[in-house]
Image (tube, rainbow, N blue to C red):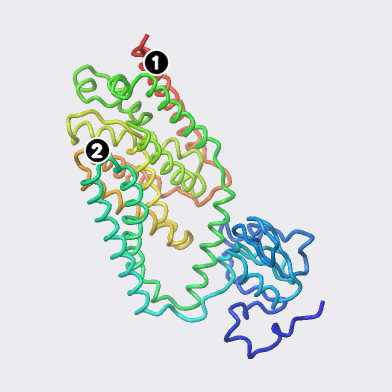
Amino acid sequence: MSQDPIEQSPENEPSDPLWIWQPDSVWFRPLIPSDLPWGSEEYLEKVPPEATGLYGVKVGSSSVVDDQRYEKGEIVTVGSRSELYRLIGALSSMTDLIFPWYDRLVTSGLVAPHLTPIDPNRYRRDCTRGFVKGLLISLLCAAGFVFAPQLALVFFIFGTFSGLYPMSEAVVIWLYRLDRLSVDALNRRMVNVEFFRLWMGTRQSRGLTVGLVIMASVFVCQMLVGTPQSIEAAALVKSRVLEQGEWWRIVTTGLMHGNILHIAFNGMALYSLGRLLVALVSPGLLSFVFLATVVTGSLASLWLGPGQASVGASGGIIGCLGFLLVVTIKFRREIPSSLQSSLIQACAVLVIYGLVGSAVIDNAAHAGGFVGGVLLGVICLPWLRLAPTSERGIVKVLSLLSMMVLALGTGKVLWELWKVLPS
């Protein structure tokens, strides 16, 4: 196949963002961390046979180019680099590129490397702008929460994702000081992050999915009974535990929730953190870490928290967060630092919400779960392995026992709800 002149002309390099892609070159190949579980080109999608030997893109969102409509995920090919540039400019977005000499789809995160270090002044300016913007949005949503309580849910969701998270992210990015990294370090970091992301996309956990379905089913049963009645029946009612010896509630409370928003946020958090724990350490440890930190969270709430009843899986979820922080510290040279920064960011948001919503949030349970997760991570630290292909015998035993306890806890919740079900 003849080469397009733009591919061979050095004077095009300054204006050509893809000049790094010369024939038979794959700039990121030497930087792939082949000694890590995700360090393989196999995680890049294969170029379809009909696109082999051509330039092309994978469409990111529905677009119309020259009266031709292209749908999201569709592969569009062209014969030269100049046509490729025209296509990229006309599309609304694209997720992958295709080059004639490479048999893999190049994800957008791998298209162009860093060519110069990050400008420190711009880095600090962007961090400051992100923090100020997030702070203003958070304050506006807080004001809306107070003056328009009927829209509290809207302000809560918008303030969390558009205010608190960007604000805390700006702080974490500032602390990591990526502007001090060399060009080579920046590119190695970028390649490691992208292949880690692709690898995580292949990790699955049926046990986690089953657990979430069970948790949702328990909540449906709670609604049938009535939330106040269900909480009284099986959640962490302090007097029932201390005065009547119903210690089983320190487990069952972690399987229940107070309202639809509560279970929605907890479900998303458990899914995100659970997938990470399963992929990085062990599928078997998830149920054990969750159960153990539900218990430490419940005990902290029981002895250090307010007197009112407590309900929710937050202790176990934040316990998984604490455990994962220890994992990212142990494997800090392997796991992308962006993962650790996102976990720190989540901790910051939880602290802010804990301070602001102390009247309705059981901070003692959250703190107890987090400390329990960290301590559990420290205890397990000597024998933790990164993405093991097989599980140790002790992990299998702990997993089996914890799943049995959680299953019994679920049965106990359903039995208690059955007893108070309106006739």
- Outermost residue, right direction? 1
Image quadrant for the C terminus? top left
Total number of numbered discs in the rendering: 2
Name above or below for residue 403 compared with residue 229: below
Disc 1: which residue: 415
Disc 2: which residue: 362
Image quarter of residue 18: bottom right
Image quadrant for the N terminus? bottom right
Work out whether residue 71 or residue 33 is closer to the camera in this orientation and state it. 71
For mark 2, give the secondary structure.
loop
- Outermost residue, bottom direction? 11
* Mark sitting earlier along the chain (2/1): 2
Residue 388 percent coordinates (x, y): 54, 48
For mark 1, give the secondary structure.
helix
Disc marking residue 360: none
Residue 393 percent coordinates (x, y): 51, 37
Identify the amino acid type marked 2.
Answer: Asp
